[in-house]
Amino acid sequence: MKFRRSIAPKYTQKRAVLTFDRFLHLKAGSGAAKRYLEDIDSQPKVLGIPVSTIPAYTDPKIIAWKGQLLILHAHPLPADQGGYRVSIRPVSEEETLRKKVKIYETILNSIHEGVLVTDPAGYVAFYNQELASLEGLDPEYAVGKHITELYRESPETSEHLRVSQTAEPIAENYQRYFTSTGQEVHSVATTVPILDGDELLGVYSVCRDFTHMKEILTRTLKLQDPQAEEKDLKLLAQEQAVTKKRAGSSRSGQGAYYTFGDIIGKSKAIQNVIEAAKRAMASSANILIYGETGTGKELLVQSIHNGSPRSSQPFVALNCAAIPENLLETMLFGAVKGAYTGAVPTTGLFEYVGEGTLYLDEINSMSIGLQAKLLRALQERSFRKVGSVTEIPLRCRIISSINVDPLTCLQEQMLREDLFYRLSVISIYLPPLRERKQDILMLAEYFLKKHAEDYGVKKLDPELIQAFQEYRWSGNIRELENAVESMVCMSGDDKVLTREHLPMYLRQNLELALGQKKGNEEGSLQLNDSLMGTETALITEALKKYKGNVSKAAKELGILRQSLQYRIKKLGLEAEKFRSSTN
């Protein structure tokens, strides 16, 4: 097909003329001109403009009137006669086209979809602002460039060039490509030929930004189905980076790579957690895990999934704090076409996971409104897509986690109380690293081996090990691993890692903590120890009084039963002992 060159014909329509006296009363006018007059008997207007303003048009001006572009020009008549001779004529076809192009460009630059127009040969004729924001290119640079100059694509892989050759549109297709500057872009685009009969005038595509959504989802979705052909969530799963753990794994869990054997530690605290989790994995009840940031909550959740009867089903982890509320609702429940502006049919995670496990991390960050919708889904064991009235069975198991004390979540209304009860049928407390100091050396040596593979054999200085044992590790296991990795990278040829290899912030914090400990060695009790001792005494007294009845003890103490259970576990108490004892 050849690109047709259009030649604008000469415009021959005569101009219309109206004559007004010095008082701007109409004196005469051609038949063609009078159609431009309005409200002659009350407040006369020409092209919608009050006649009283005609003196302002002694210089020709373009007027938009009823979808037309017309030039209005008022010629003053001789002074002895007074008045104006007003001429009205259409603008030239060239000027009309220029104005229309300007209008269309303004419209296309204001919409929230990227628009790209090329001629039949693949050279860019138009490139709008939204596409420039998506791809990081300058529209002035893009116009005039060939498709293969703007993108790292060949004539065989470019959809634009394919449509140029076939004149067949490609609708709603997911695209992953790179610009000439190396920027990775993900979009959903429709590419359409512009035809005049059998002649191809050009090709245009309209695309929606999928990059931002994908950046969010790829941090939270961990799906293991590289052969999936479905779009939406399965398509994102295909684009996930392959982790080392996944590469060496033959486990059946889809998206869950860890088992209880991957949990490092021999302390009583972590062994109690593993034992509780193993008991919980055989059940289908919802689980709520409380643990500070960096304690390894997802590792524990994946272990539960892989050890459960649902291990062959999908596992999806979703961080509720990382996703905007309106997007989070659609991700969970799905949506039907037309549910909101730009909505397309979407499969939600509730539906996609099927009979697998859905892990909702930091669920206390979810809005109260969305928590109410989640509560209904859990109560009814069914849900509706956004914009739909059809109920869909909820078959997956929900495991959620919080990084704030449950009592604080309830008191500060970060979590609905009724939802808390639904989620915490089984509750597991994952202790921070400072409460399992026996595991610090084991974890440090594991991370040292993991990160020192390319640097040769490294060892930890005994003084450094002692410092690690005394430090509080507010960032828990994640902070410990980052510290070890940083030391390995900065150690160079040194075979023994010392305090000098620590990151500056950690070295300062460590020295400050050790200095405070030294100042307290003469026997002064730390505030935390004192508070914990008081708390233990109060709870023990209440349990003794009511012979291990947790509900009555909680009422006596003025706290929720769930909060008391959590504190009993945290302090290492056993309510059973008080039931068997006699006063």
Image (tube, rainbow, N blue to C red):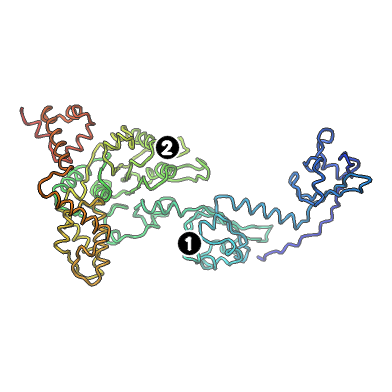
Residue 123 rendering spot, x and y as whole percentages:
61, 65
Residue drawn where x is 34% and y is 53% of the image: 222
Q: Nearer the viewer, residue 241 or 407?
A: 407
Q: Identify whether 494 is placed above or below 229.
A: below
Q: Nearer the viewer, residue 531 or 67?
A: 531
Q: Amino acid at mark 1?
A: Tyr
Q: Identify whether 175 is placed above or below 425.
A: below
Give the Cα separation between the discs numbered 1 and 2: 35 Å
Q: Amino acid at mark 2?
A: Arg
Q: Identify whether 379 is placed above or below 143.
A: above
Residue 33 rendering spot, x and y as whole percentages:
85, 45
Residue 16 rendering spot, x and y as whole percentages:
86, 48
Q: Is residue 374 left or right of residue 76?
A: left
Residue 177, numbered circle: 1
> Which quadrant holds residue 425?
top left
Residue 401 rendering spot, x and y as whole percentages:
29, 43
Residue drawn where x is 86% and y is 42% of the image: 34
In front: mark 1 or mark 2?
Answer: 1
Pointer 2 residue? 384
Q: Earlier in the sequence, mark 1 or mark 2?
A: 1
Assess disc 1: are there few (<14), some (14-19) or many (≥20) residues with their C-alpha within 10 Å of its C-alpha.
some
Assign the C terminus to one quadrant of the image. Answer: top left
